[in-house]
Amino acid sequence: MTKETAGVVRESGQAGGGPGTLYIVATPIGNLEDLSPRAEKVLSSVAVVAAEDTRHSGRLLQHLGLRKPMIALHEHNERERVERVLNELQAGKDLALISDAGTPLISDPGYIVVREARALGIRVSPIPGACALVTALSAAGLPTDRFLFAGFLPAKRNGRKAALESLKREQATLVFYESPHRILDTLADMVEVLGSGRELVLGRELTKTFETFYSGRAEAVLDELQSDPHGTRGEFVVVVRGAESSGDAAGESGLDVDKLLALLLAELPVKKAARIVAELTGGSKNELYQRALGLKER
Ligand code: SAM
């Protein structure tokens, strides 16, 4: 049932007779036993399945003993296939959207379909399950109270380094996806941009037979992966500890912050000295201002 008041669309369980429901169904990221009973129930009940790769997902359906009409919906044709998906829903059919692995829309197609379905008042119902980023984060042993999922970094080195540069001072835990042929380059760029001492945890082949976690300082993890003959095989999630607080970031720069402030304070007003040190070290202007005031008083 869909209700609209003051621009807010509220939709809940079906009243029947209207459009079908679009189910967003999470599938396993490696271990077929991670498919939930509810996901299986929904997949067997829907009229149509929209999948990223119909051959790949066809095997999952076959494993469940199901045969369903399928619509291929991948990154390159999503815009053009939206209409077909919406037509099926508007004709009253229930449809399940699945991707090759894990939760659809998480670095996977589906955003346009979900957005347009919602705009038409079609019920969109998520069937939660595996997701590589949450799976890795839950076992990484890094803070999970705040995290930033950055998906795949750019494929080219310059773009990748620029993206890492923009995340360097982020204090939340960072989570990235990476492919086997880029993992070593990405780790090398992390060492260079985020620093060799930045703590990270690499989750490889999660939920599969060769599931492995590598954890430690960025440089050590890179060395370990390089020396492991199977190290670059499989799929990866990289979980990186966020930056220390900006006051500590100043300390991390390797410069003696207090000495620098004291030298500048002999020549400049507090505010200016703090601004220059913030510029040089990447520390917080406010925190350095307070620190400079303290030094001046002393
Ligand atoms: N929608 C998926 C999800 O919910 O996690 C992610 C799809 S994205 C196209 C594929 C990437 O997810 C892989 O390149 C890898 O970085 C990560 N990934 C997927 N399965 C994984 C696994 N079993 N172990 C480690 N990483 C995995």
Image (cartoon, grey):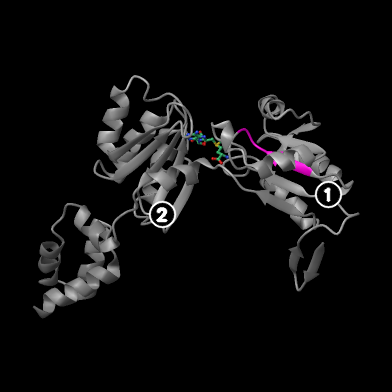
Residue furthest bottom as drawn: 297
Q: Does the residue labelled 2 lie within 8 Å of ligand 1?
A: no
The quarter holding residue 228 reads top left
Residue under numbered circle 2: 144
Give the residue displayed 39% in from the left and 56% down from the top: 172
Measure how far apart labels 2 and 1 are at the Cα level.
37 Å
6 displayed left or right of 157: right
Q: Nearer the viewer, residue 139 or 3?
A: 139
Is residue 269 something that shows in the picture? no
Q: Nearer the viewer, residue 40 or 17?
A: 40
Q: Where is residue 100 in the image (x, y as percent from the top left)?
A: 62, 33
Q: Nearer the viewer, residue 161 or 174?
A: 174
Q: Where is residue 162 in the image (x, y as percent from the top left)?
A: 40, 44
295 displayed left or right of 71: left
**Label ID, residue 20:** 1
- Label 1 environment density (alpha carbons within 10 Å; few <14, some 14–19, many ≥20): many
**Label ID, residue 271:** none
Q: Where is residue 159 in the image (x, y as percent from the top left)?
A: 44, 39
Q: Give the range drawn in magenta.
A: 95-100
Q: Is residue 170 above or below residue 111?
A: below
Q: Is residue 242 above or below residue 101?
A: below
Q: Is mark 1 on a helix, strand or loop?
A: loop
- Quarter of the rendering occupied by the N terminus: bottom right
Magenta stretch encompasses residue 51: no
